[in-house]
Image: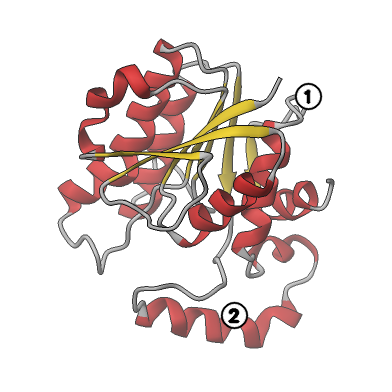
Amino acid sequence: MKKTAIILGASGLTGNILLHALIEDNRYESIKLFSRSKIEGLSNKVTQCIGDLLNLEQFRADFTADEVYCCIGTTNTKTPDKKLYKQIDYGIPVNAARLSKANGISTFLVMSSMGANAKSQVFYNKTKGEMERDVLQENIKHTSLLRPSLIGGERKERRTLEKIALFVFQIIQPLFIGSFKQYKIIEPKLIAQAMINLANNTSHAEVIITSNDIKRIAKNN
């Protein structure tokens, strides 16, 4: 039987690649997007639910599917207010997990970040770590937390510091050997494919998926 998927964050770099991959994937008959604004020119397979993602509860009746893909994330440049930042990076994924549990969705995949740690003194890492902790507390049967390293690719918005970091990492990548391989730049296409593969092979034992494992799983079609 063909499946229905929910995507949160389909307008972002990885989320948009994921969206188009699922549109082309014959295992899926329906894709639901939950977002603040409409994406034009999409397949008839896609249903768009537009509203305030900080109040996901308003979507409770429509929040039904076989799988949820959460690709939500912001930046300090876009969201300098730390309270709002946490409402997005922590609040949306955790509330999505709670809705998934309440509505009987058994597969939940969320993009986190390398360095996520609820006890970290770094705000970004602490926020991601707290998000992971509270998503896991929902005990959704098939949960995958993906921790990619620095993500490559071209973004719509200007991210000067990220572009500088990508440039530097591209130069020094040959030095990343052994345990340092996990710090290599990862392409968003690999993250999207790994998420799809994880959703369609729930025998994976891993819950926290590191950057190296994301690459490995993405190639196991």
How far from the left and from the top, in percent, is residue 217?
77, 46
Q: Where 195 falls versus 76 (above or below)?
A: above
In the picture provided, is 12 more to the left or to the right than 37? Answer: right
**Disc sitting over residue 169 in the figure:** 2
Label 1, on which residue? 203
Q: Quadrant of residue 97?
A: top left
How far from the left and from the top, in percent, is residue 72?
40, 47
How far from the left and from the top, in percent, is residue 132?
46, 34
Measure the C-alpha gap from mark 2 to mark 1.
34 Å
Front position in the image: 202 or 184: 202
Look at the image and tell me in which quarter the N terminus lies: top right
- Amino acid type at circle 1 is Ser
What residue is shown at x 78% (from left), y 70% (from top)? 177
Q: Where 123 falls versus 93 (above or below)?
A: below
Front position in the image: 110 or 44: 44
- Amino acid type at circle 2 is Phe
What colouring style does the render use? secondary structure
Figure label count? 2
What residue is shown at x 58% (from left), y 53% (from top)? 20
